[in-house]
Image (cartoon, rainbow, N blue to C red):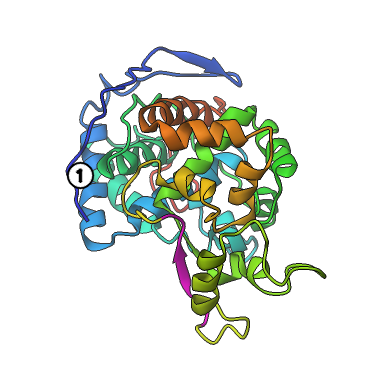
């Protein structure tokens, strides 16, 4: 996978201090205490991506899943213990897997700037880096998050499920202070995504009493998915990319939705529902607009649940 950084013309220098949920984040937070922090993270992510092309999708998903549970506090990185099953072992996070990339970045940062850069900030910067390295927009990541000490696998039930309709998605995002446009925009992160058959198999077989297959799905696309994901699941839990350019960050995800080729029911619903259809169409026609809005929504997502309560972990896998 190419690792050349493409910086779009719609560079968003969102480096002002933002106050949200009792905490202040700042684009220059580590300028004096660890000025090399972002370059260390970027190089670590770049090296990992060379060896595993799925790293970008997994790190971007890690950021989403971390922020949606208890806010952006790196609770997704804490290991389970005999007394507690942690978030990373909850069903939606089993396929994230790229925790070793954050571990590697943290080890290097501890050598360069001991006890300074939080694990939560590493995830946020890494999420930006994988988007940019994959051809998407660049934005200034606001930093200064603290790491949480609580992580429970049961909380992952609150993550948006792939079978939700638009109403369910709106409610889920609204609980995090995110609007309808943010929801449609952040769903575009699936342009780097892949899934397993189990997440969308009900759309292909015995969909309803009237239709065996979801009628909103392009018929040729449905046939292709059925071959890859038979009802007997003889292929095991096979993987399926979520758009036709799965290693490149672009607006193809939205073009696929317009063509009836959304993999998840939650994705295709965005084009069916009148509350979100126009946004999908605008992004499918204007990639620069999508890039601009994605950067803005990622900054908003990065502020979800941020507070001054917490610590800077020495090891991202366990509390100090």
- Region in magenta: 236-243
Is 68 situated above or below 100?
above
Q: Which of 62 and 6 is in front in this view?
A: 6
Name the residue furthest top.
16
Is 126 situated above or below 306?
below
Name the residue furthest left.
4
Q: Locate residue 210 relative to residue 239 in the image: left or right.
A: right
Q: Locate residue 163 relative to residue 236 in the image: left or right.
A: right
Examine the rendering and report whether any part of residue 280 can be seen.
Answer: yes
Whether 237 is among the magenta residues is: yes
Image location of residue 154, percent across then percent down: 69, 56
- On the image, which quarter does residue 289 sit in? top left
Q: Is the magenta stretch mostly helix, strand or loop?
A: loop
**SS at mark 1 in the image:** helix
Image location of residue 22, percent across then percent down: 59, 19
Name the residue furthest right.
209
Image location of residue 100, percent across then percent down: 35, 58
């Amino acid at each position: 996978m190419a690792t050349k950084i493409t910086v779009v013309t719609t560079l968003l220098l969102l480096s002002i201090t933002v106050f949200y949920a009792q905490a202040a984040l700042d684009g220059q937070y580590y300028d004096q205490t660890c000025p090399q922090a972002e370059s260390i993270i970027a190089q670590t992510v770049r090296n990992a991506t060379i060896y595993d092309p799925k790293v970008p999708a997994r790190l971007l998903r890690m950021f989403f899943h971390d922020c949606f549970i208890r806010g952006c506090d790196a609770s997704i990185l804490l290991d389970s213990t005999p007394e507690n099953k942690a978030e990373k072992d909850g069903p939606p996070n089993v396929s994230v897997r790229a925790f070793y990339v954050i571990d590697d970045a943290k080890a290097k940062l501890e050598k360069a700037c001991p006890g300074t850069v939080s694990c939560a900030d590493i995830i946020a910067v890494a999420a930006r880096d994988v988007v940019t390295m994959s051809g998407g927009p660049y934005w200034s990541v606001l930093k200064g998050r603290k790491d949480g000490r609580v992580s429970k696998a049961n909380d992952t039930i609150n993550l948006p499920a792939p079978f939700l309709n638009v109403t369910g998605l709106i409610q889920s995002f609204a609980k995090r202070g995110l609007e309808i446009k943010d929801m449609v925009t952040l769903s575009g992160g699936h342009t780097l995504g892949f899934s397993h058959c189990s997440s969308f198999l009900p759309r292909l077989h015995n969909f309803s009493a009237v239709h065996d297959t979801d009628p909103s799905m392009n018929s040729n696309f449905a046939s292709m998915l059925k071959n890859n994901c038979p009802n007997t699941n003889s292929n095991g839990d096979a993987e399926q990319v979520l758009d036709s350019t799965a290693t490149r960050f672009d607006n193809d995800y939205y073009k696929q939705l317009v063509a009836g080729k959304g993999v998840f029911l939650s994705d295709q619903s965005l084009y069916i529902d009148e509350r979100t259809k126009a946004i999908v169409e605008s992004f499918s026609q204007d990639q620069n607009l999508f890039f601009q809005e994605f950067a803005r929504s990622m900054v908003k997502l990065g502020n979800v649940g941020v507070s001054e309560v917490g610590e800077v972990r020495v090891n991202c896998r366990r509390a100090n």
